[in-house]
Amino acid sequence: MLENPTDGAHSKLLERSVVITFVTHVEVYFRDMLDAIFRQCSPNFFVPKLKHIHNIKYDIEDLIEIYKRQIHPLELVSSEVSFQNTDKIEKVFSKFLGKSVWGEA
């Protein structure tokens, strides 16, 4: 039986690839869930919570560019939120639940 010295390198590459793929899938899932809240829920439910999730201030040039590109304000919210770790997921979704998302899960 021949030993391949690159097997170890390939397995490490595959391990890293699996972790990166998993994190990406989790991030996309939670971004889709945030978009679903915006699509399905009444604005009365989510508008008061937006300032706690997205507190970026825009100057007038930014607002003009947003208007020209016809970007919906809620797209800005979901595109700027990172869901790459559990703390950030907790920060956003606990605002909607009023308690810990992980406690509810």
Image (cartoon, grey):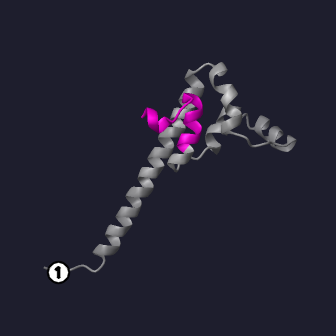
Left or right of residue 44: residue 56: right
Query: 10 Å neighbourhood of mark 1: few (<14), some, or many (≥20)?
Result: few
Above or below, comparing residue 69 to residue 7 in the picture: above
Asked whether residue 22 appears in the rendered view, the answer is yes
Quarter holding residue 74: top right
Q: Nearer the viewer, residue 67 or 59?
A: 59
Q: Residue at x 42, y 53 (%)?
A: 21
Q: Residue at x 62, y 18 (%)?
A: 42
Residue 18 among those drawn in magenta: no
- The type of residue carrying mark 1 is Leu
Instruction: For the N terminus, give its image quadrant.
Output: bottom left
Above or below, comparing residue 6 to residue 89 in the picture: below
Q: Position of residue 38 (x, y in %)?
A: 60, 27
Magenta part, dominant SS:
helix
Q: Secondary structure at mark 1?
A: loop
What stretch of residues is rendered in magenta? 89-105
Left or right of residue 91: residue 62: right
Residue wearing tag 1? 2
Above or below, comparing residue 97 to residue 8 in the picture: above
Q: Position of residue 105 (x, y in %)?
A: 42, 34
Left or right of residue 71: residue 38: left
Above or below, comparing residue 67 to residue 12 in the picture: above
Q: Position of residue 63 (x, y in %)?
A: 81, 38
Residue 95 among those drawn in magenta: yes
Quarter holding residue 77: top right
Quarter holding residue 5: bottom left
Asked whether residue 83 appears in the rendered view, the answer is no
Q: Residue at x 74, y 38 (%)?
A: 69
